[in-house]
Amino acid sequence: MLTELKKRFVFLAAITIILLVITYPALSAEKPPAQGETLPHFELAVPQDSAAKSYLGLSGSGKFTVPQIKARVVVIEIFSMY
């Protein structure tokens, strides 16, 4: 009887740990900025295509930030792939 109870407890504990590991990224994700707030700092790879670089007003290689784009308005579309 006690052995069966231990097995059930271990099984429930394992399921709980697995569910926490799976859901943790969604629970810890930051909320997107509200209207009027600033974007968090992030970097993007500079495109290899010279036409795309020219369109964005970038030069060189490596990474760039959104404020480095030479434009009056920058539209960023963010979507989830999950």
Image (tube, grey):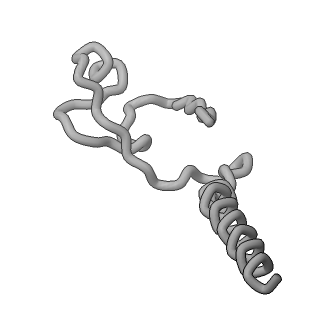
In this view, the residue farthest toward the top is: 51
Camera-nearest residue between 20 and 36? 20
Q: Quadrant of residue 77?
A: top right
The residue that appears at 70% across and 63% down in the rendered structure is: 15
**With 35 as the anchor, is 63 left or right in this view?**
left
For the image shown, how many numbered marks are present on the structure? 0
Residue 37 horizontal/vertical position (percent)? 66, 53
Camera-nearest residue between 15 and 27? 15
Residue 36 horizontal/vertical position (percent)? 70, 49
**With 13 as the anchor, is 52 left or right in this view?**
left
The residue that appears at 73% across and 46% down in the rendered structure is: 35
Q: Is 60 situated above or below 55?
A: below
Camera-nearest residue between 58 and 42? 42
The residue that appears at 66% across and 50% down in the rendered structure is: 32
Camera-nearest residue between 8 and 25? 8
In this view, the residue farthest toward the front is: 1
Quadrant showing the C terminus:
top right
Quadrant showing the N terminus:
bottom right
The residue that appears at 25% across and 17% down in the rendered structure is: 49
In this view, the residue farthest toward the right is: 1
Residue 74 horizontal/vertical position (percent)? 52, 31
Residue 75 horizontal/vertical position (percent)? 57, 29
Q: Is 65 situated above or below 59?
A: below
In this view, the residue farthest toward the bottom is: 2
**With 28 as the anchor, is 73 left or right in this view?**
left
**With 37 as the anchor, is 65 left or right in this view?**
left
